Image (spheres, helix red, strand yellow):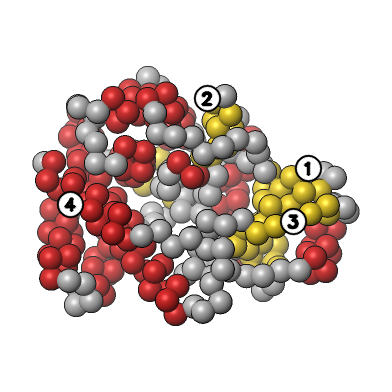
Amino acid sequence: MSVFTPIDREELLPWLLAHGIEDLRDFRGISGGTINTNYWLETTSGDWILTLVEDRPAAAVQPVMSLMQSLYQAGLPVPGVRVDQQGRLVGMLKDRPATLVQALPGDHPEPTQSTAAEVGRFLARLHSQTLDLDPLPLNFGPDWQREQAQYWQDRLALDDAELVRRTIQSTRLVWQRRWPEAWLHADLFPDNVLALDGQFTAVIDWYFASCGPRIWDIAIALNAWCGGAQPDTDPVAAALLHGYESITALSATEVQALPLMRRSAALRFWLSRLESARNSDKNETLEAVTVKPPVEYRNLLLTLEQSH
């Protein structure tokens, strides 16, 4: 869902005290969230990002925080999680699961050859991690896409409904194959990356992280950073794959499957944005929450379909 939860200073101070933070200098809501509520906190113990999780219970947030902390400890550019005085990674605030992670420096990078190569290298490092954690189920995969397709079938224009149907059908076989699996970010857009002087300082927003085919993560990233461009003709898309394979090789079969995975990834974000837009229309209190235009990924899906 897309919900913005307001909070005042008096509610926040006791919660911070339980995390060993006694002096809150300032805090402000962060615009641009599509699902969760985020605040930037300035304290004497540094700057922090407070997240109120709107779409799942605390038990489902705990594995995500454990993953972030493990990746941070492994040396990846991932924010560390601040635990409370009982050592818990996830608390409750305003009747919602709440987390506190480092606010790291940097700006969202532009898609260039150098940043795309860095995306590829980061994904390869992530996918090579062997962590002593319970696996997280795949989010927004083929089962979810089929369910959403059924819901939207009679609610979309005829051409759009047919595009959804064709995509579900054409990507069915690629999902039936067993692919090399890994830990996935599954939402690696430029606005989920911070960079400083050309180097990634933080990959953020791990709430869609899961375990699944590594080419699913690569497909999502190619779409997010390169649009409909193809690695065989576009230098930015090629740089992303080259960056990945400078650390971990992909099989020829995985590379051949990427075009279909990219179409499935485009469908996933088109459908999830349609759902977010539908929920925002029902929520009159929505503030500071970005509902990204569904048509962007509908058009991307058409482009990808026409490319192959």
Q: Position of residue 5 (x, y in %)?
A: 62, 70
Inspect this view and state whether residue 269 appears. Answer: yes
Residue behind mark 3: 27
For label 3, the SS is strand
Q: CA distance from mark 2 to mark 4?
A: 32 Å
Q: Amino acid at mark 2?
A: Gly
Q: How many marks?
A: 4
**Gap between marks 4 and 1 measured at Cα:** 45 Å
The reply to whether residue 268 is visible in this rendering is no
Is the residue under label 2 in contact with that under label 3 (CB below 8 Å)?
no
Q: Secondary structure at mark 4?
A: helix
| Amino acid tagged 3 | Phe
Q: Assess whether mark 4 and mark 2 are in contact (beta carbons under 8 angstroms).
A: no
Find disc 4 in the rendering and name its residue. 302
Name the disc covering residue 269, or none.
none
Ranked by sequence position, the earlier of labels 1 and 3 is 3
Give, as a three-letter code, the residue at label 1: Gly
Instruction: Say which amino acid is labelled 4.
Output: Leu
Name the residue that disc number 2 marks: 198
Please state which of residues 47 and 67 is positioned toward the viewer in this rendering.
47
The reply, left or right, for residue 81 in relation to residue 15 is: left
Quarter holding residue 10 = bottom right
Q: Residue at horizontal 23%, vertical 53%? A: 299
Q: Indicate which disc, 4 or 3, sits on the residue closer to the N terminus.
A: 3
Query: Residue 302 location, x and y as percent?
Result: 17, 52
